[in-house]
Image (cartoon, rainbow, N blue to C red):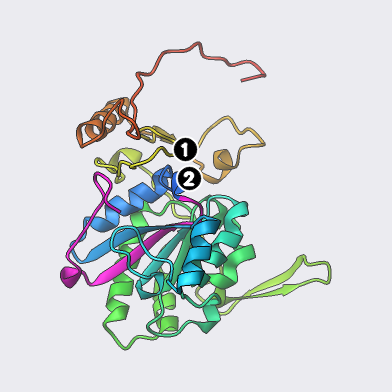
């Protein structure tokens, strides 16, 4: 929690505490660009403090159990159960059991139906959010699609809810007005004997389904200029700059090529400014554990059947 560019705020001035959770170990989660974008957006608001939480290795989990300590954030060591909003990334299916571990070790009720006023709002997002049903019962709401233009608005709604008498259900109903927000508890699902879905019935007449949220202009979208620099080697040990989102090739094996359509590209000059800006803000281009920059080398463009 003391890496270069990590955000620390005065708790006395913070009104909303947000935990951004990557349900895998630090080396994986600190390489995830999406979490860095949300971390930057939320921490621009002086009343919001977004901190990071990762899944503990099995030895750390055993120590938490032995000592009776709850899972906590990196920046302030705040217990997970004391956060107002918990945002969990759904990057791939193999981490679904880690989500339960994180909530359980953090002292947060696992089931959405068991949470009351005062418990954290658990929000999901990421690529696997396009099929959230395997874990839907553990989430209050799930963002389908791009979250940059939604996250701050949702956080402010939760901040208003925190200091009001508004019920959780009323808050969730208000959140459904935002495009891309799926609230599982507002749908009833019947299954066949073989487990296939027989019928989906919306509980709210004006909320029949969800249309994904889409950022239309990447050049205008938020992007961190001072990313956190890990103190240890991580999987992607370099500055990550998103040059495009979506793809026109349509490869059948590629999840991202389908769910992040349509293709959106950043202006190359902005990509250069983002890369140079990150390198100038405390990053060591060649140091141990730092983020390395490599100049792009032009390559032959392959357009044949093996491309």
- Kindly identify the residue that appears in the image at 24 percent across and 28 percent down: 276
Is residue 138 rendered to the left or right of residue 155? right
User: Can you give x and y, in whole percent of width and height, for residue 158 in the image?
Assistant: 33, 73
- Kindly identify the residue that appears in the image at 39 percent across and 50 percent down: 35
Relative to the observer, which residue lies in front, 66 or 260?
Answer: 66
- Which residue is under mark 1? 235
Give the mark nearest the N terminus, 1 or 2: 2
Q: Provide the secondary structure element on which disc 2 rests.
A: helix
Whether residue 13 is visible: yes
Residue farthest toward the bottom in the current orientation of the protein = 165
> Could you tell me what secondary structure mostly forms the magenta stretch?
loop
Is residue 30 rendered to the left or right of residue 63? left
In which image quadrant can residue 178 be found? bottom left
Q: Which residues are magenta?
A: 1-25
User: Can you give x and y, in whole percent of width and height, for residue 227 in the image?
Assistant: 29, 42
User: Can you give x and y, in whole percent of width and height, for residue 126 in the image?
Assistant: 49, 53
Is residue 222 rendered to the left or right of residue 200? left
In which image quadrant can residue 157 be found? bottom left
Q: Quadrant of the C terminus?
A: top right
- Cα–Cα gap, marks 1 and 2: 6 Å
- Kindly identify the residue that appears in the image at 40 percent across and 14 percent down: 297
In the rendered structure, does residue 20 fall within the stretch colored magenta? yes
Above or below — where is 193 with respect to 221? Answer: below
- Which residue is under mark 2? 28
Residues under numbered marks 1 and 2 in contact, where contact means CB atoms less than 8 Å apart = yes
């Amino acid at each position: 929690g003391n890496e270069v560019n990590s955000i620390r705020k005065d708790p006395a001035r913070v009104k909303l505490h947000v935990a951004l959770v990557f349900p895998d170990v630090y080396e994986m989660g600190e390489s995830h660009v999406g979490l860095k974008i949300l971390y930057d957006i939320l921490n621009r608001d002086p009343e919001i403090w977004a901190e990071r939480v990762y899944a503990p290795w099995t030895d750390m989990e055993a120590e938490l159990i032995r000592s009776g300590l709850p899972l906590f954030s990196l920046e302030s060591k705040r217990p997970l159960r004391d956060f107002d909003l918990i945002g969990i990334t759904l990057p791939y299916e193999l981490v679904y059991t880690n989500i339960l571990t994180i909530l359980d070790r953090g002292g947060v009720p696992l089931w959405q139906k068991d949470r009351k006023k005062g418990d954290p709002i658990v929000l999901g997002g990421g690529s696997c959010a396009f099929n959230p049903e395997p874990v839907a019962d553990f989430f209050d709401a799930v963002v389908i699609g791009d979250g940059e233009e939604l996250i701050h608005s949702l956080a402010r709604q939760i901040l208003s809810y925190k200091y009001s008498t508004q019920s959780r259900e009323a808050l969730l109903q208000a959140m459904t007005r935002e495009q891309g927000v799926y609230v599982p508890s507002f749908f009833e699902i019947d299954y066949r004997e073989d487990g296939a879905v027989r019928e989906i019935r919306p509980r709210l007449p004006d909320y029949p389904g969800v249309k994904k949220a889409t950022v239309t202009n990447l050049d205008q979208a938020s992007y961190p200029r001072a990313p956190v620099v890990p103190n240890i080697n991580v999987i992607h040990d370099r500055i990550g700059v998103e040059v495009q989102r979506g793809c026109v090739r349509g490869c059948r094996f590629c999840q991202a090529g389908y769910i992040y359509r349509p293709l959106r590209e950043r202006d190359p000059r902005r990509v250069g400014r983002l890369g140079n800006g990150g390198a100038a803000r405390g990053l060591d281009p060649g140091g141990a554990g730092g983020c390395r920059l490599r100049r792009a080398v032009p390559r032959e463009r392959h357009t044949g059947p093996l491309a």
